[in-house]
Every structure is written in structure tokens, then in C-alpha cells.
Image (cartoon, rainbow, N blue to C red):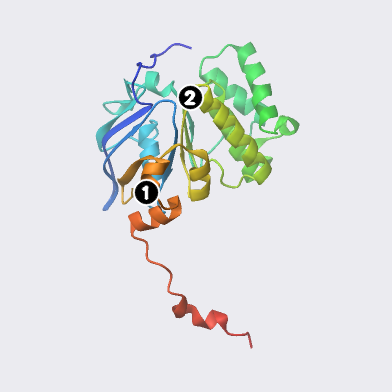
Amino acid sequence: MSGAAPVPGAPALSLRGLTKRFDDTLAVDRLDLDVPAGSFYGLVGPNGAGKTTTLSMATGLLRPDAGTAAVLGTPLWTGATASVDAKRLLGVLPDGLRLFDRLTGAELVRYAGLLRGLPRDVVEQRTAELLAALDLAGAADVLVVDYSAGMTKKVALASALVHAPPVLVLDEPFEAVDPVSAAGIRAILRGFVAGGGTVVLSSHGMDLVERLCDRVAVVAQGRVLAAGTIEEVRAGASLEERFVALVGARPADAEALAWLRTSSR
């Protein structure tokens, strides 16, 4: 598989001034962020914070209105199109990804590998290994349209991993995944980072990010409010407490729902 080689010492992702507007809504507002190579990086923020839009622009799925993105030193956006060389360095699991669901699980992963230019024998071996590791071997010949939500998430992850990218970008990778499968995925991702890869994941689960990631960025209203190591961002509190303080969330008014505490009649 040909393409650009990673630039030594370059961040896994380098985002500068990323901006995206949808009609009158400014979804991402001149966002700057560096993700160090070899890190397990969490991206957290409230609903509508711009996380998915940011990751889409950072992986070539959505063209920014302004700003730049680079993957391991290779510029991603060259005019209106995303660089194929930069995209080859990425494995991407977007949130709400539409798959070719009339393929079987094995066919889908094979297709992803062949599309990346891998030799067929390598694709066959990696497909079998990935499906086994993700507990999908028994469903390898089942159409993806018949998969559960959790199984679909796992086969999409296998497709993102099959070409062994140095940078893996995952948008809500644990959503709809059962606890046993989630533990297996966490083990795979930890091994990926231990072997020198970079994982960037967005999640609403503060406990998950705190346990899994070594660095984190808090995003709200399309901007980075805080970024650094987990310890730096927590600043002596839990990540959830720090998150609430940073985004200025207003606690729920329990008194306004006092009727919920009355016995039914």
C-alpha cells in the first residue's frame, strides 16, 4: 500500500482554525487541537458541541469552511478535496456510519481491505483474525443488515482496523456495545496504542475516557475549552466534575418536577 510516510515527531492530528457553519449555525469555531502521536486521546463535550463535525473534518469526511488539518505531518485538505495519502494513514469509525449492509460481515471487512490496496491473502488472514477478536466469527457469513446495533459497530471497527493504520479515529465506538464486547474492544485499542498507534475517540462516557485515555480535550460550542493530560484537565477533580464546570452546565431543577414524587392516583 503506497502513500505518504508519517513525518517523525509530527502530531497524529494537527488541527488549525477549523471552522464549519451549517446555515446560521456555527458548528465549529476556529478550533485548534494537536493530538500527540502514540496517545490515547479522548474528545468529550455536550450534545451539539461540534465533536462529530470536528472529527469529520479531521478525517476527510467533511470539507471545512476554513482551517487546516494534517495527519502525521501530511496535509489532509488540498483545496476542495481530501488527500488520499493522508487518508491512508487513518482508520475511521464515524458515528451513524452507513455500511454496505447487503454484504456479509466477512465480505464487508474484505472489501475494506481490498479497497486499501492490501494483497488478497493478507486481507483474508486479517479478516478472520479481526472477526475472531471481536467475537464475530460466528456471524462472518451473516448479512450485516441482520446484525444487531452492537455487532454493526464491531464490524465497522474491524473495517477501520484491517489496513493497520497508524491513527485510529472513533466516534462513539462503545455506543450500543455490550459490556463483554466493550472489554474486548478496550483490550484491542490498548494493544494498538502500546504498539505505537494513536487512538482518538469521542464519547459521552466520562468514566470511560478517564479510565481509558491518557489525554483529553473538552469541546463546547465548537471550541476547545481545555486540553492536556487527564490529570491536567481534571485539575484535582473528577473528569465529570471538571467537564460540568467548564461547559457551565446548569443543574436540573428537581423542584420543578415535584409532581413526580407524588403517589399515583
Front position in the image: 185 or 30: 185
Q: Are marks 1 and 2 in contact (CB under 8 Å)?
A: no
Q: Which residue is mark 2?
A: 197
- The percent position of residue 19, horizontal first and vertical second, equals 27, 41
In the image, taking residue 136 as reference, residue 246 lies left or right, namely: left
Residue 156: x %, y % from top left: 57, 34
Which element is circle 1 on?
loop
Residue nearest the viewer, comparing 221 with 65: 221
**Amino acid type for the residue under numbered disc 1:** Ala
In the image, is residue 24 above or below residue 200?
A: below
The residue sitting at the right extreme is: 138
Which residue in the protein does label 1 denote? 235
| x then y, percent, for residue 163 | 53, 20
| Of 107 and 155, the residue lying toward us | 155
Residue 167 appears in the figure: yes
What is the x, y in percent for residue 74?
33, 20
**Separation (CA) of disc 1 from disc 2:** 27 Å
Q: Which mark is residue 97?
A: none
For the point 33% across and 60% down, the residue is 248
- Image point (65%, 45%), residue name: 179
Instruction: Give the residue drawn at x 36%, y 29%.
Output: 13
Specify whether residue 100 is in view.
no
Judged from this view, the residue extending furthest toward the front is 236
Give the residue at x 64% y 31%: 103
Spot the residue most to the bottom.
265
- Against 223, is 187 above or below? above
Q: Is residue 121 left or right of residue 138?
A: left
Query: Which amino acid type corresponds to the residue marked 2 in the rendered image?
Result: Gly
Crowding around mark 1 (Cα neighbors within 10 Å: few <14, some 14 to 19, many 20+) is few
Name which of mark 1 and mark 2 comes first in the sequence.
Answer: 2
